[in-house]
């Protein structure tokens, strides 16, 4: 069996082209969707992610601005910046690049972002609303995974989905989103005993654990849909996912590569959320406030 490759690069191009039409309509109405990115410190990986996001914004016609702070900046200064951006009519989405330095309170920073501008979907309101399936914004990576499944016409209802990873950014919201679509969901962690007994029963397997090639061909149900969210850098500098791609692609029915799979879709869904925020602002749609 040769798995069908779910190409995130090609899919992101198609999705962005569709949403570019919505950007053009907003511009005709006098609204330029705007995304503000805050980065603290000089983490090389974070800097690359921010550059990629800004580049994507430019390509689709979204205005972007980057607010950079040194690693030793006081938390209050960043909070003041967020408050200014919350009040700016030119900024529709605010993203704080994680991780933050150790002296920051991540939760305080994230919850200071206005809900209607929380395009990362990390605010407690959006995280909690996932339980009802009705957040203002879906978190970008799980949103990208669901879009990949939908556009490949992969049925979710009634299937057994296994999510390996329990992070607040991917694992937990991914489980809720699959559950909302009618899947029977099992959540595993890096501490799960005999992980293979769960992964071998998965019709849909989503891995986001951060351990290079930990999922082998023997752990996969023949024909399963395998979504690899992990990204790891090997000793030789090459990137790989949490899945042993070359071996697993001979067992799975569908598989995402790393790089070129979920990553491009994550940035694409950030753009979509920003455009949606601008559309709501233009139409005067009222969101729940943090006050």
Image (spheres, grey):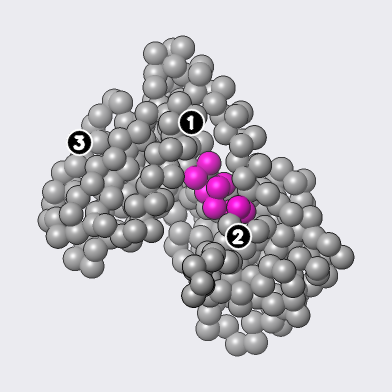
Which quadrant is the N terminus positioned in? bottom right
Which is nearer the eye, 11 or 275? 11
Q: Looking at the image, which residue sits at the far front?
A: 236
Give the main secondary structure of the magenta stretch. helix
**Nearer mark to the viewer, of 2 and 3:** 2
Can residue 149 be spotted in the picture?
yes
Q: Is residue 32 left or right of residue 260?
A: left
**Nearer mark to the viewer, of 3 and 1:** 1
How many callouts does the rendering have? Answer: 3
Which mark, by number, is residue 123?
none
Considering only vertical position in the picture, is 246 above or below 70?
A: below
Q: Looking at the image, which residue sits at the far right?
A: 1
- Residue 289 image position (x, y, % from top left): 31, 39
Circles 3 and 1, Cβ within 8 Å, touching? The answer is no
Between the residue at mark 2 and the residue at mark 3, the CA separation in whole angstroms equals: 37 Å
Residue carrying label 2: 258
Which is nearer the eye, 146 or 212? 212
Q: Is residue 202 left or right of residue 73?
A: right
Q: Give the residue displayed 70% in from the left and 63% down from the top.
A: 226
Q: Give the residue displayed 63% in from the left and 48% down from the top.
A: 8
Q: Earlier in the sequence, mark 1 or mark 2?
A: 1
Residue carrying label 1: 59
Residue carrying label 3: 84
Q: Magenta residues, as a range?
A: 260-268
Between the residue at mark 1 and the residue at mark 2, the CA separation in whole angstroms equals: 23 Å
Quarter location, residue 176: bottom right
Q: How many C-alpha atoms fall within 10 Å of the one at disc 1: few (<14), some, or many (≥20)?
A: few
């Amino acid at each position: 069996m040769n798995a069908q490759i779910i190409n995130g690069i090609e899919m992101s191009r198609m999705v962005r082209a569709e949403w570019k039409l919505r950007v053009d309509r907003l511009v005709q109405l006098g609204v330029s969707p705007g995304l503000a990115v805050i980065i603290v410190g000089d983490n090389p990986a974070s800097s690359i992610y921010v550059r990629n996001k800004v580049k994507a914004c430019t390509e689709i016609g979204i205005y972007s601005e980057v607010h950079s702070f040194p690693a030793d900046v006081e938390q209050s200064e960043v909070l003041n910046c967020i408050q200014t951006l919350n009040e700016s009519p030119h900024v529709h989405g605010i993203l704080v690049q994680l991780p933050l330095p150790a002296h920051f309170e991540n939760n305080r920073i994230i919850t200071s972002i206005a809900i209607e501008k929380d395009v990362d979907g990390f605010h407690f309101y959006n995280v909690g609303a996932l339980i009802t399936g009705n957040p203002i914004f879906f978190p970008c990576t799980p949103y990208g995974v669901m879009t990949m499944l939908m556009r490949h016409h992969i049925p979710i209802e009634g299937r057994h989905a296994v999510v390996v990873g329990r992070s607040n950014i991917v694992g937990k919201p991914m489980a809720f989103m699959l559950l909302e679509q009618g899947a029977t969901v099992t959540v595993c962690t890096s501490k799960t005993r005999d992980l293979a007994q769960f992964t071998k029963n998965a019709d849909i397997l989503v891995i986001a654990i951060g351990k290079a090639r930990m999922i082998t061909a023997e752990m996969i149900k023949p024909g399963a849909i395998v979504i690899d969210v992990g990204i790891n850098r090997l000793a030789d500098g090459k990137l790989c996912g949490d899945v042993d791609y070359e071996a697993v692609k001979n067992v799975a029915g569908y598989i995402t590569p790393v790089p070129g799979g979920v990553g491009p879709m994550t940035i694409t869904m950030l753009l979509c959320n920003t455009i949606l925020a601008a559309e709501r602002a233009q139409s005067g749609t009222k969101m729940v406030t943090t006050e």
